[in-house]
Image (cartoon, rainbow, N blue to C red):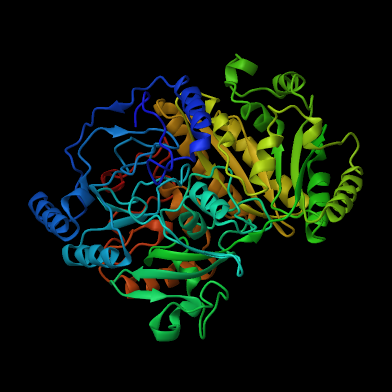
Amino acid sequence: MTSKSTPPTLDDKHSGVPAHMADYAAQSKAQLYSNRTMPDSIARSQEVPVLPPDVSRPAFNGAIDELKKLLGDANVEINDKPLVDGWYIEHPNTHDAFHITDQEDLVSSAQVYPSSTEEVVTIVKWANKHLIPIYPISMGRNIGYGGAAPRVRGSVVVDLGRRMNKVLEIDGSKATCLLEPGVSYFKLYEEVQKSGFPLMCDVPDLAGGSVVGNACDRGVGYTPYGDHWANHCGMEVVLANGEVIRTGLGALPGKDGGDNPSWQSFQNSYGPAVDGIFSQSNFGIVTKMGFWLMPRTGSTTYLVTFPDDDDFEAIIEVIRELNQQRVIGNVPQLRHIIQELAVTGARRETFWKGEGIMPRSAMREAAAKLPTGDCSWCFYGTVYGPDALRTEHLAIAKAAFSRIPGMVFRLPSDLPASHYIHSRVKVCSGTPELRELDWLNWVPNAAHTFFAPIVPTRGKDTRTVHELVTRLHHKHGFDSFPTWCIAGRQSHYIANIIYDRADPDAKRRVNELMMDLIEACAKEGYGEYRTHLLYQDVVARTYGWNNQALLKFNQLLKDAIDPNGIMAPGRAGIWPKRFRGRGFEILMGDLRGDTKPSKEVKSNL
């Protein structure tokens, strides 16, 4: 995992790329490292390993020795080596590769690698015995939201992916699959192709992440099955007390004690539907998860460009209309022209050598040299189905967008092979890609985090959020990269904050910007649907209707399910009783430049 290492393939490692993408992965890595000025690793300044809270070094050492006897020496690693940020394909499971505070703030004490649900139970019982917090990850590629880093320093990371990465079943007649947490979108795609079944899997922009992990964090893709949580069906979960449950019809044993034949067919069982409490939470560890796969069908991706920034509201109104009518068949994207510049892989200095925010005039000048010419907004949509249906829906979409003066409608055949539309063609047809990494070349040592509020798909609401986000980006000295993932009734606004992780001032400004964004949008009634580890407490408290009733309910569940508080304390802003009120929470102002974190917050990061 150095600048000179070769990116692994799936033949080498569960987290690798398909062999046919090896050259592309190597090129992506070389491009990113060409703009990196930091060394592969930096000497650690703190005593290692960092200890879990309330655990002495002798007690920790004894507990780790016990864990090694239970799982084998090779399956327990102490985090006492230099921290290496790596890159997307060769990422760490020890800390946040895209650190926004000090690299050593969000670090594990150790990593453990179970091979089965039974071994996960063993780890959970061990953690309860020694009161050591554990932090489960599927693969740790939730890059931009904290990656593999634990929320509580010194937690033991339970890395499920290394040894639990099997596609357990693909059922061609039901169009379903059953997966372990270490199955990436790359691997699922390859296994679906090998199966010979006429199926496709929905993939996000980057396909190296865990299918299970992405769904549990309520991530999205871009086909009609783009809501990954909505298309899961049945889970096996190890609770924080070591009990194992199955959700949905998996709770009903099949014939002779086997798996229920409808486990991946119907999402609910009898009584309350409990699946939801295991998404974006810290109540259990998902060890198996079922999904619905999409029957393979034809698709056509198209691009519509619009000339003026002020076209924004009209564009949103047309998209809502087409989405509600199901003319747009997928989760489409509306991107500002600055995103089109960044995704070319060129550095910011290629387009603008001046100081401060890239001016709009410079964007227009640079955009004029792109195949699509000078424009403001780029909409990528896709239609699905037989040829005749796709032709009809394309015509309807083109006519609707034509109401906006100056729009230009293009198909992939209208644009050169190097254009980003061809990446969208692959992603929107369920084919894994890496092209989205290219915008990380924008600044040296590039890292990013997201601000991701949910907004009604309505012109006035989207304008309110867009103008607020843009203004605050500029206030803190960042270019604004707005992307909208748009459904018929709501839209995900994805504000991508790109920063130089070697620049302490840039990281300070990121924290101030995020706090301002969360606070300002919440005042207008717009809340994030997921966020980086550092901001989860603040975001959780914005959902404060009726005197924080939702947070109190989540704490009630946490204390009942996890009385010892060992399971990912603090994740999603949910703290167990033994951690609450001790300075572990990071609240509004704790990471602002004009407010020094309290001693407790700094020591507990």
Q: Is residue 259 left or right of residue 343?
A: left
Q: Residue 469: which quarter of the image?
A: top right
Of residues 442 and 345, the one drawn nearer to the viewer in this rendering = 345
Up/down of 600 relative to 446, above or below: below
Residue 396: percent from left, percent from top = 89, 51
Of residues 172 and 41, the one drawn nearer to the viewer in this rendering = 172
Residue 459: percent from left, percent from top = 78, 50
Q: Is residue 104 left or right of residue 395?
A: left
Identified at 51% across, 78% down, the residue is: 261
Identified at 52% across, 58% down, the residue is: 215
Identified at 44% across, 72% down, the residue is: 553
Of residues 405 and 580, the one drawn nearer to the viewer in this rendering = 405
Q: Is residue 437 left or right of residue 413?
A: left
Placement of the N terminus among the 4 image quadrants: top left
Up/down of 560 relative to 487, above or below: below
Q: How many marks?
A: 0
Up/down of 439 relative to 556, above or below: above
Whether residue 467 is visible, yes or no, is no
Q: Is residue 275 left or right of residue 462?
A: left
Residue positioned most to the top: 353
Q: Residue 130: which quarter of the image?
A: bottom left
Residue 390: percent from left, percent from top = 83, 52
Residue 263: percent from left, percent from top = 51, 75
Of residues 350 and 579, the one drawn nearer to the viewer in this rendering = 350
Identified at 11% across, 51% down, the residue is: 61
Whether residue 470 is visible, yes or no, is yes
Up/down of 232 relative to 403, above or below: below
